[in-house]
Amino acid sequence: MKLTSLFTITMLREQWIRAKYERKEFTEPGKQLPYSDGVKEGILWKRGRDNGQFLPRKFLLSEREGCLKYFTKQDAKEPKINIKIDVINATFQPVKIGNPNGLQITYLKDNKTRNIFVYHESGKEVVDWYNAIRSVQFHYLKVAFPIASDNEVSQLTRNFLKEGYMEKTGPKQREAFKKRWFTLDHRRLMYFKDPLDAFAKGEVFVGSRENGYSVQKGLPSGTQGNFSWHYGLTIVTPDREYLFTCETETDQLGWIEAFTSIINQAMTPQEYQLPFKHKILQVSILSANYHC
């Protein structure tokens, strides 16, 4: 089981038990749940984009407007950021953020992924925000994609398939390999210099097998470059090859499993309309003479 999935299950189970037995939220027929009325407003501690300091910020979620906003001051009339609900993802990240109630919100800005890291002192409040985002996004996307199944729509808010460190080299494939943090968010592979960076340094879109995507293990023979790890991966695109190395065989096989799981899935109507300008990339992890 993926670590982020375990965090999600644990937090949601705990708050569901508390909601049922402590707060009695499900005992009154027709009672409005705190995350289901299409609007949520409150204070979350947000990590600064540049200085890394957590400061209280007002957040406002609106199903009617189809957006999530946050304000630098509680009495501010104009939001610092206005995020369209259909490009938002949210996942629990207590270890990465360093707080048991940590939540990572990601969205697309100018076709690049932007990360927002927040937390709240109350586990209930964080879970309410998580459920509110899912509820608003679900209803909004059901209107935008009326023929999509509930299962297809609900998958747009999800845990990351895999995260961790790999080494990568540059486009000439002769540069030194550098250690970077990678996140596979469904069909989007991103890499960061630091796990808490606000923006990804690079992104690759990963499609389905029926669109020509495949995955194997290893690096191309004759690969040059100064790399410390020897369990190699190569992502091949129409324009260039992306070379990676993993520290252990377990890591290498884990990444291959993650790529395979997404490549074997047919793309949904929503995924064909994702606002990416990246080209559809063919993923092929090639065998070589390195450890496999």
Image (cartoon, rainbow, N blue to C red):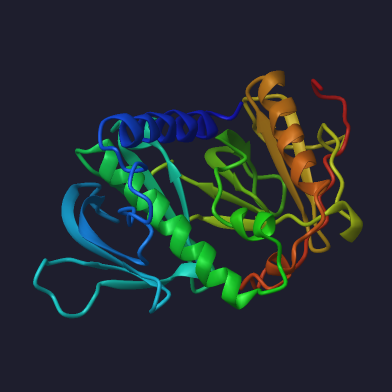
Is residue 26 toward the left or the right of residue 229 in the image? left
| Viewer can see residue 208 | yes
| Viewer can see residue 177 | no
Residue 253 horizontal/vertical position (percent): 74, 26
Q: Is residue 208 above or below residue 141?
A: above
Is residue 237 toward the left or the right of residue 23 in the image? right
Residue 89 horizontal/vertical position (percent): 49, 55
Count of marks, rendered view: 0
Is residue 139 toward the left or the right of residue 60 in the image? right
Q: Is residue 277 above or below residue 263?
A: below
> Looking at this rendering, what residue extends furthest in the left direction?
75
**Residue pictured at 20% horizontal, 47% vertical:** 54
Q: Is residue 290 above or below residue 236?
A: above
Which quadrant: the C terminus?
A: top right
Residue 208 horizontal/vertical position (percent): 82, 54
Residue 145 horizontal/vertical position (percent): 65, 74
Query: Which corner quadrant of the image does residue 38 belong to?
Result: bottom left
Is residue 97 toward the left or the right of residue 261 in the image? left
**Residue pictured at 44% horizontal, 64% vertical:** 136
Query: Which corner quadrant of the image does residue 41 belong to?
Result: bottom left
**Residue pictured at 25% horizontal, 37% vertical:** 23
Of residues 193 and 265, the one drawn nearer to the viewer in this rendering: 265
**Residue pictured at 64% horizontal, 30% vertical:** 227
> Looking at this rendering, what residue extends furthest in the front direction?
29
Query: Which corner quadrant of the image does residue 61 belong to?
Result: bottom left
Of residues 250 and 135, the one drawn nearer to the viewer in this rendering: 135
Of residues 215 and 44, the one drawn nearer to the viewer in this rendering: 44
